[in-house]
Image (spheres, grey):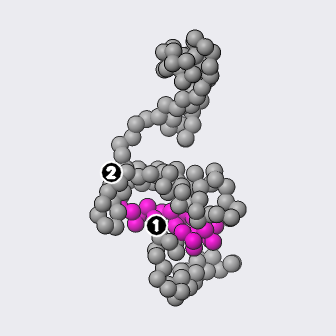
Amino acid sequence: MRCPACQYNGTKVVDSRPVDDNKAIRRRRECEDCGFRFTTFEKVEETPLIVVKKDGSREEFSREKVLRGLIRACEKRPVALDQLEDIVFSIEKELRRTGNSEVKSEEVGEKVMDKLSQVDEVAYVRFASVYRQFKDLNVFIEELKEILKKNPSL
């Protein structure tokens, strides 16, 4: 491993620990020449998960894109970033567990809404209003009624 500080091609591993549910290893390294310490991650290379969009186009599944959508929906809400990262991780895990290399964008969106509804109802409605492209107030009200049916204590 090349040192990012001095470009020397020799480092030693100082510490290793599993991360991401034992799917990756975090290694703390030290340059044998200049002593600079840095962190690397070793991860199993997975086959790409392709998302088929509504218009038929295809793109690789992006954790970051899903996380950005969740962060936007949860703006000014009491939802921790760790919770959102866990949601993204569990959605990707569920999608990969099916064994299909392609998944419809609608399936991803529905999984996001399902997980988000369990975390924060306001964030769920925000996400759903963008994802389902509510055309008018009546559609929005129907969605709110569905939420109240599922959780009558609200």
Residues in magenta, as a range: 104-127
- What is the secondary structure assignment of the residue under circle 1? helix
Q: Looking at the image, can residue 59 be seen?
A: yes
Where, by quadrant of the figure, is residue 75 drawn? bottom right
The three-letter code of the residue at mark 2 reads Ser
Q: Residue lying farthest left?
A: 56
- Relative to 46, does residue 95 appear above or below in the rendering? below
Question: Is residue 151 toward the left or the right of residue 134 in the image?
Answer: right
Of 151 and 85, nearer the camera is 85
Mark linked to residue 110: 1
Residue 122 belongs to magenta span: yes
Residue occupied by mark 2? 101
**Rendered location of residue 140, percent (x, y):** 54, 82
Q: Amino acid at mark 1?
A: Glu
Mark 2, secondary structure of its residue:
loop
Q: Quadrant of residue 151?
A: bottom right
95 part of magenta stretch: no
Q: State the image coordinates of residue 5 (x, y, percent, origin top left).
A: 57, 22
